[in-house]
Amino acid sequence: MELNPDLQEKKIFLIEGLKSTYKRQYDAIQPLPYIKDRLYCVDKVFVEGGVEVCLVPELTPGTRGSWERLESYKSIYTDIRFKSKRRIIQGEPGYGKSTLTLQLAYDWCNDVSDSPMNNVDILILLRLRQLGSIKSLYRAIKSFLLFHEHRVSKHDIEKIIHSCSSVHIILDGYDEYPGRDSNDNDDVHKIIKMELFRDFDVSLTTRYLPACLRKETKGAKLTGFDDKARDEYIRKAVVGNNDEEVEEIKQQVYENSILADLCQVPLIFVMFAHMVHDQRDLMKFKSVTQFFKHMIRCFYDHLKQKFKGNRSNEFYLHEMEHHELDKIAFEGLNKENQQLSWIKTRFRQRVGQELYDQYISIGILVEEDEVNDDSTGDNVLFTTMVRFYHKLFCEWYAAHHLVTLVKNAHNLSDMLRFLDPFDLQYLFRFACGLNPKAGKKLINYLKRLPGGDKFAILCILEQTGDVNDIMDSVKELCSSAVNIDRDDSALLQRSTTQLLEIASKNNIPISRVRLVACSPRVDESGLNLILQSGLSLSILSSLQALWIYDFNRRLTNEELAAILSYSSQCTSLKDLKFISYDLPDTIPVGSIPSSLKPRNVKGIVTMTS
């Protein structure tokens, strides 16, 4: 559709206004929330973690989808097998969904030649949690992206967008969208269901995949940082190409092996890497509770330094006593539909002005404007909302209140009915690490849940900080076959992999590991077996048997050689089987590492049905 000269000029204003808004957003990346004057452009810190796409969807809970790893986030848009007008990008909290959207915005604003956004006429990036009761896309664009551009109206936006040959809409954070569980016929749901803008490309980021979208939408997921991504981030954003300093930071990560799972979360690893670089003498942590306590201490130490010790005693008191903040966090998580943001005025009234200002200054809390429900027409009113910097911080403070409740409770089942360990694993781990009495009750509760016995072992470790206290449990676990199934919950898979690595590091024999439909591959370092869920298994020196089951999956020669190479480094391995696999017809000479042969490993390339 041709635009008249007036609208053509307004289109230029619209594009310039969008780019101005996106630049303010992508130039304000803050790796350490308590250092507000250290801001980065997204392109200077963005590092690609793992990305996988679903080529065959999971249509029902009993069916198995087919996921494949991509080389780059760009392939989500360029891989012909993933061609679609609707794409969902999933990822757990802190896995970089919003950072990825800002990188795409940077690409568009700066005409990055190899970016999938390069030929897009107009890019619309909206953070869904801010929309409040707004149901119109055009009103949302005007309110959040073009609020400073008075020469372009809501009606101009509508006409301009419909005239464009290429529009890409990115809706960030569906899981935080106020209208996600409603049946309202708003523009967001119309767009997702292709009832609106059928010819526009739409990307949706979310923690979970809504059931109504599983059939119509292509799915990708972010699986976190592997060793390569961590190395790249340290070089790109922390120390540059100083090999000695890179190795110092990586050594701190490896020495803190109990944090391996946390450091897979990009947001947490980023904070960890910068803290290590700033302090150099970071202690060795025996639990995630100990690490998080230290991190909160760093937040407060930075604030104390700003005031040169004049209010140290006051800050120390506030660091130790935060009962109302604990209660608010717990109330938000202990609901059928979790509440992760609060109206600023009410929140501030509960915790008090002085403490509120401290939490904001330190970076534990962040403020964000959302559209007020009382807004009408072009008269847009905003309400300032407050949320924790990351959900893990919400879990940390909620754990303190959970401890208080659990210590005096007789029946935990009813009290914890909305607290799912799968979704809130660190809430339980923190609580066990904070108080032995409450931890004991929680561990007994967890043992009664399906698959909860393995998670309970990690909570025991969290409680004591001493691996020796869980050795009997780990030995018992490893004395028989240990299964990791693709259909296991993320919590169960995490717990199992961490316990296997604890066993290996303590020379406890692992009789057999069975990987069922996990489609394992080996990362570029050759030191980690990456499961389909994105979790990794490092080399298990005490592993005696590895059986890999998959259903009609064909292994290439390269994939087989990589798995054999990984297996050869498991120095106790005596039994390796591939079951229900479609293996290469011939095994090239040299594929079987020479180190495996002297051990007389059984069934190195046996294919069993």
Image (cartoon, grey):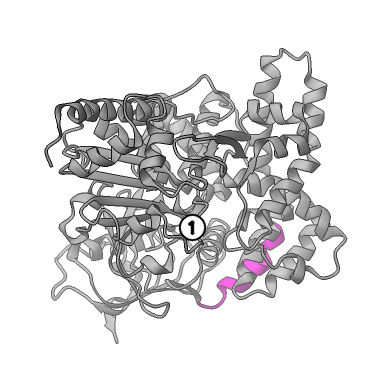
The magenta segment = 468-481
**Foreground residue among 8 and 559:** 8
Q: Position of residue 230 (x, y in %)?
A: 41, 40
**Residue situated furthest bottom in the rendering:** 609
Does the rendering let one see residue 236?
no
Q: Residues within 10 Å of mark 1 (few under 14, many from 20)?
A: some
Q: Is residue 254 above or below residue 3?
A: below
Q: Is residue 15 above or below residue 392?
A: above
Magenta stretch, main secondary structure, is: helix
**Foreground residue among 139 and 577:** 139
Residue pictured at 37% horizontal, 63% vertical:
532
**Foreground residue among 231 and 526:** 231
Q: Position of residue 33 (x, y in %)?
A: 56, 30
Q: Secondary structure at mark 1?
A: loop
**Quarter of the image where one finds residue 304:** top right
* In the image, residue 473 lies in the stretch drawn in magenta: yes
Q: Position of residue 557 (x, y in %)?
A: 18, 65
Q: Which residue is mark 1?
A: 180
Q: Is residue 428 above or below residue 367?
A: below
Residue type at mark 1: give it: Arg
Residue pictured at 20% horizontal, 30% vertical:
7
Q: Quadrant of the N terminus?
A: top left
Q: Quadrant of the C terminus?
A: bottom left
* In the image, residue 469 lies in the stretch drawn in magenta: yes
**Residue situated furthest right in the rendering:** 408
**Quarter of the image where one finds residue 111:** top left
Is 1 left, or right, of 252 in this rendering? Answer: left
Q: Is residue 28 above or below residue 485?
A: above
Q: Position of residue 157 (x, y in %)?
A: 29, 37
Does the rendering let one see residue 123?
yes
